[in-house]
Amino acid sequence: MPRVRVHNFSVSLDGFGTGEGQSLDAPFGHAGVRLHEWFFATRTFHAMQGQPGGSTGIDDAFASAWETGIGAEIMGRGKFGPDHGPWPDKEPDKQWNGWWGDNPPFHTPVFVLTHHPRPSVPMDGGTTFHFLDASPAEALAQARAAAAGADIRIGGGPSTIREFLSAGLIDYLHIVVVPIVLGRGERLWDGQEALEDHFQIEAVHSPSGVTHLTLSRR
Amino acid sequence: MPRVRVHNFSVSLDGFGTGEGQSLDAPFGHAGVRLHEWFFATRTFHAMQGQPGGSTGIDDAFASAWETGIGAEIMGRGKFGPDHGPWPDKEPDKQWNGWWGDNPPFHTPVFVLTHHPRPSVPMDGGTTFHFLDASPAEALAQARAAAAGADIRIGGGPSTIREFLSAGLIDYLHIVVVPIVLGRGERLWDGQEALEDHFQIEAVHSPSGVTHLTLSRR
């Protein structure tokens, strides 16, 4: 049975997965890039950007696991772009297709959850963005069909992960605790009391200062 | 200069330092003992109880550091007992002197913060409970005088630690992240945005599953 997986999802010590005040220029709000510096330093991220180099230690070992065996991703609209409500009414050839550039790093179908569906957008490199107004279970069924037997990645943000967790649909999470206190934003763990009853949780620290958690469904 | 230190303070993944519903029979509310199992397993805790045995690995190394060089403790009233408001009016010889037994493990002066001062209570083994209605800075001044040059421990609970952090009075914290999601209770990190600007934070995991954080004032 294909698994449903979360990878490389960073939270602050106080459990915020994004900061407050997301905008086009600030995808993570007041958190800036501080939740993701451990990831940006890795060889895996460098390779995504077509750049050489990058760290090859513990952080990269975790980072690189994000792609293996994945056949589709499901993400919240906030991971695609900062807009809320109806999509801006622009000419199709001027359409803004998210934060991920012409050749997004996913290389699979990506299902963007939104109450405002729009036509699918094929991108370079094998990524196609589909837009769904669907429950977690419905979205997962569509993603499974598209993934053709491979695993599904739940890409975030925090509220999307929470919804899939609350629906009991996630098999594995890799969560990275970054030693900063954000104070505000969107929390990952809210509504997840006693999550440990359903997951085996392991922790390992990295020389970079972050702690990697793995949560594996029992 | 003597330092102000926090030791062995456990929080859940979602940052709760105590659960909801503290009472005489449930000092940690719905959290039960789950935040403290790592500590109860250590040789340090066993010795506090006059018992042999206990683990002697990473968890015990951290646990044992709590006593070294400490001359006084400051704690919130909730760490002394579950009562709020005026103290129950009982005969002095029937007075309940907290959760810590006849021979509390502190063996120093202990300053209990309360809006309802009462006479000091000397206990066996060198612990004396003093009851103060005072600001963090005032309480610290009294504790420093009593500690005669030794360090001061801030014993918790979460709100007491937060108050001392917000006042900039803490030099060192040892925080233990336990892999459970409590969902409700009292949070440690609230109001501490950008704490990392003031502390060097390190993390190390333990085979027991917990992660020890040290926060050292820059």
Image: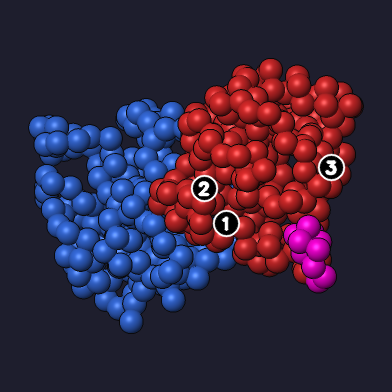
Chain colours: A red, B blue
Distance of mark 1 from mark 3, alpha carbons? Answer: 28 Å
Comes first in the chain, label 2 or label 1 = 2
Residue placed at 65% from the left, 33% from the top?
Answer: A112
Q: Nearer the viewer, residue B11 or B96?
A: B11
Q: Which residues are magenta?
A: A44-53
The amino acid on which the numbered mark 3 sits, given as a three-letter code, is Gly
Q: Is residue B135 visible?
A: yes
Q: Position of residue B158 (x, y in %)?
A: 36, 48
Q: Which residue is identified by label 3?
A: A126
- Residue A55 part of the magenta segment: no
- For the C terminus of chain A, the image quarter is top right
Q: Residue at x 64, y 55 (%)?
A: A211
Q: Which residue is mark 2?
A: A18
Confirm or deny contact between disc 1 and disc 3 (CB under 8 A): no
- Note whether B110 is above or below A116 in the view shown: below
Disc 3: which chain?
A: A
